[in-house]
Amino acid sequence: MTATAMKLQISTPLEIVVDAANVASLRAADASGDFGVMPGHVDLLAVLETSVVRWRAQTGPWQFCALRGGVLAVENGDTIRIACRTAITGDDLSRLEREVREYREAETDAARHARVAQTRLHAQAIRQIMRHIADGTASEAAELEGLMQ
């Protein structure tokens, strides 16, 4: 029996981003290039590139999901599961492109702020260690001076 539609699930470690039924076809990309999946497809496991996965329900427009890499599994010709680190969905490709750009800028900004905070913390720890060493050296010097008298 050949499946007439597929179920699609795209998930990140924190959430299920897409849970769609009645999927008629899907396009994705791995290291060898773009490929398509339709109902009845043989079982497949593919490592996806950072790309946009697109699918269409039996009725309706194309849907899109920008992925930062991931693993795609086709099971029994009727289920597609994609596990990825991040996923941003949309139904308009140009708007999705803007959202991905904004997400990456925010991510870069957050990483920059984290590096600054980490550097400050590191500098404070070094200052604290240096004060401790200086205090220890001063007290040792006073002890030695007291012993020598």
Image (spheres, helix red, strand yellow):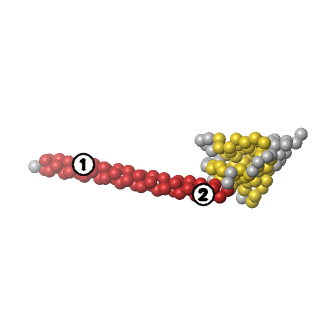
Residue position for label 2: 98
* Marks 1 and 2, how far apart at CA: 57 Å
Q: Nearer the viewer, residue 91 or 11?
A: 91
> Can I make out residue 14 in this image?
yes
Rendered view: 63 above or below 79: below
> Measuring 38% from the left and 51% from the top, which residue is drawn there?
121
Query: What percent of the width, then of the height, locates residue 50?
Result: 65, 56
Looking at marks 1 and 2 on the same chain, the residue that comes earlier in the sequence is marked by: 2
Residue furthest left in the image: 149
User: Relative to 129, is 63 on the left or the right?
Assistant: right
Counting the numbered discs, the total is 2
Residue position for label 1: 136
Quarter of the image that includes the N terminus? top right
- Type of residue at label 1? Gly
Q: Nearer the viewer, residue 81 or 139?
A: 81
> Can I make out residue 69 in this image?
no
Badge 1 crowding class, 10 Å Cα cut-off, few under 14, some 14 to 19, many 20 or more, is few
- Type of residue at label 2? Arg
Query: What percent of the width, then of the height, locates residue 141?
Result: 19, 51
Closest to the camera, between mark 1 and mark 2, is 2
Task: Describe the element under mark 1 as helix, strand or loop.
Answer: helix
Task: Describe the element under mark 2 as helix, strand or loop.
Answer: helix
Query: What percent of the width, then of the height, locates residue 144?
Result: 17, 49
